[in-house]
Image: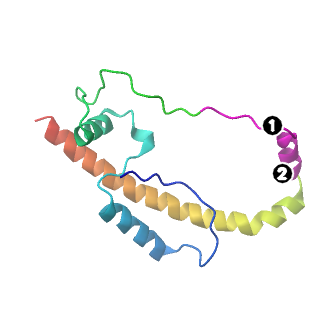
Amino acid sequence: YTKIFSAHDDRRGRPPDADSLTAADATLAESFDAVVIAEWLENPSTVAWLGDLLCFEHANGVLANRFPSLKRRRRRRGGKDFEGFRGRSYESADFWRTIAPDLEDLATRNALDLELYERAARRTEHRMTRHWVQSQD
């Protein structure tokens, strides 16, 4: 089973708080066998950990064969002059007044996301380091 976490905009109910962060962290720690940090996929210790976990060949965290690129292609926006519209919007004081509450909400949610990421990253790094040391013996 694989679950990819991504952002969604759901502002129904109460905003997330420290209890939500604790619950999300507990879910990651207890309900998932492995949390993979996408930014670490080319790190040899990540490759070794995933290779041994998912049974694919590697030599001390280095793959002999080429693996798929994770780069995304940038799609172009079509139609209207979006960049021009965005530039004019950013220059408007009314724009910033209107979105101020949304920006405050976004900052609060991002702070919780960053803290959850840090917790998951520390736990994942600990698991990978322990695995790397044990596999080198």
Q: Earlier in the sequence, mark 2 or mark 1?
A: 1
Name above or below for residue 102 compared with residue 65. below
Colouring chosen for the image of the structure: rainbow
75 sits left or right of 113 in the view? right
Please identify the residue farthest to the left as the structure is shown. 137
Measured as percent of width and height from the top left, residue 7 is found at: 57, 56
Residue 104, picture quadrant? bottom right
How many labels, in total? 2
Q: Position of residue 69 (x, y in %)?
A: 47, 29
Q: Which residues are magenta?
A: 73-89
Classify 50 as above or below 18. above
Residue occupying the point 44% across, 28% down: 68
Query: Mark 2 sits on what residue?
Result: 90
> In the rendered structure, which amino acid carries the disc numbered 1?
Gly
According to the picture, the residue beneath numbered tag 1 turns out to be: 78
Q: Secondary structure at mark 1?
A: loop
